[in-house]
């Protein structure tokens, strides 16, 4: 498993690399955004850890560029405190998860394990469908007969849960546990953010299904009335 770290705080980047190498990851470090983007484009990495405030090219531009180029590598954003707007924007651009600095190394490893879980899995090629929507777990694409959209890893993991449990209520805690993992400290609003992304994509595809909020209980994937 090879990880790219794009982080301009050299001490932090080096400290992360030490922890990750101890955990048997192979690590590349880029201290500036332009180098980071160039490295990311080689497609050699299984995961990318990306700071947002970077010299030359910022993290958001890196994420937007990679996703526009159909690069599906999972991206974990590193953010400073009090920048939740930037974080949400980063997720909206196609990042898969975020971690707020300062963080415990255990938490970093937990997030990376959750993000890489899919890469180690044998992915069933069977497509999942409901009404006019089809989802391909291999390509992470959601489609109708006339259009298709690329989902990010976390969007895909959540959508897959709903498709496998059609007409069943899924609680936020259940989604957090299944998608982010037991040991993750990801917050409930993570789930809300991803549900809103999925709703946007379903809306764009003019889906006949929708994710409804069931107050106090969670969410349910249902046919539109
Ligand atoms: Ca920075």
Image (tube, rainbow, N blue to C red):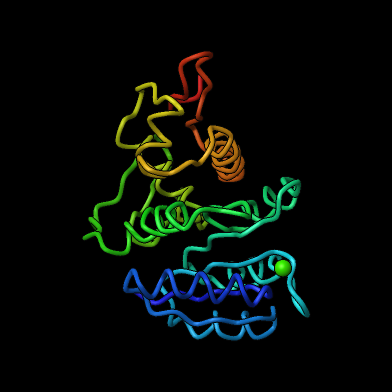
Locate the N terminus by quadrant. bottom left
- Residue 222 visible here: no
In this rendering, is residue 57 above or below 118? below
Residue 142 picture location, percent across and down:
45, 51
Residue 93 picture location, percent across and down:
65, 57
- Residue 11 quadrant: bottom right
Side of 109 where 203 appears, left or right: right
Which quarter of the rendered image does ligand 1 occupy? Answer: bottom right
At x 50% / y 76%, what residue is drawn?
4
Side of 106 where 117 appears, left or right: left
Question: 193 and 205: which one is in front?
Answer: 193
In this rendering, is residue 210 above or below 201? above
- Residue 187 quadrant: top right
- Total labels: the figure holds 0
At x 38% / y 30%, what residue is drawn?
174
Given the current orientation, which residue lies at the most extreme right position?
Answer: 56
Side of 4 where 180 appears, left or right: left
At x 61% / y 45%, what residue is drawn?
204
Question: 120 and 104: which one is in front?
Answer: 104
Residue 105 picture location, percent across and down:
47, 58
Residue 127 picture location, percent across and down:
29, 50
- Residue 27 visible here: yes
At x 39% / y 21%, what residue is drawn?
169
């Amino acid at each position: 498993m090879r990880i790219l770290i794009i982080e301009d705080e050299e001490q932090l980047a080096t400290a992360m690399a030490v922890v990750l190498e101890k955990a048997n990851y192979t690590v590349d470090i880029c201290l500036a955004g332009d180098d980071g983007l160039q490295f990311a484009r080689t497609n050699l990495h299984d995961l990318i850890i990306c700071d947002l405030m970077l010299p030359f090219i910022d993290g958001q531009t890196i994420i937007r560029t990679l996703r526009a180029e159909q690069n599906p590598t999972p991206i974990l954003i590193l953010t400073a405190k009090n920048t939740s707007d930037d974080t949400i924007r980063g997720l909206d651009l196609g990042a898969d998860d975020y971690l707020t600095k300062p963080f415990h190394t255990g938490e970093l490893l937990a997030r990376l394990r959750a993000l890489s879980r899919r890469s180690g899995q044998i992915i069933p090629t069977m497509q999942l469908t409901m009404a006019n929507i089809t989802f391909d777990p291999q390509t992470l694409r959601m489609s109708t007969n006339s259009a298709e959209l690329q989902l990010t890893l976390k969007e895909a993991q959540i959508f897959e849960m709903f498709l496998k449990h059609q007409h069943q209520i899924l609680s936020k805690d259940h989604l957090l546990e299944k998608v982010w993992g037991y040991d993750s400290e990801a917050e409930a609003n993570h789930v809300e953010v991803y549900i809103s992304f999925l709703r946007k994509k379903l809306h764009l595809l003019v889906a006949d299904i929708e994710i409804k909020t069931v107050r106090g209980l969670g969410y349910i994937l249902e046919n539109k009335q």
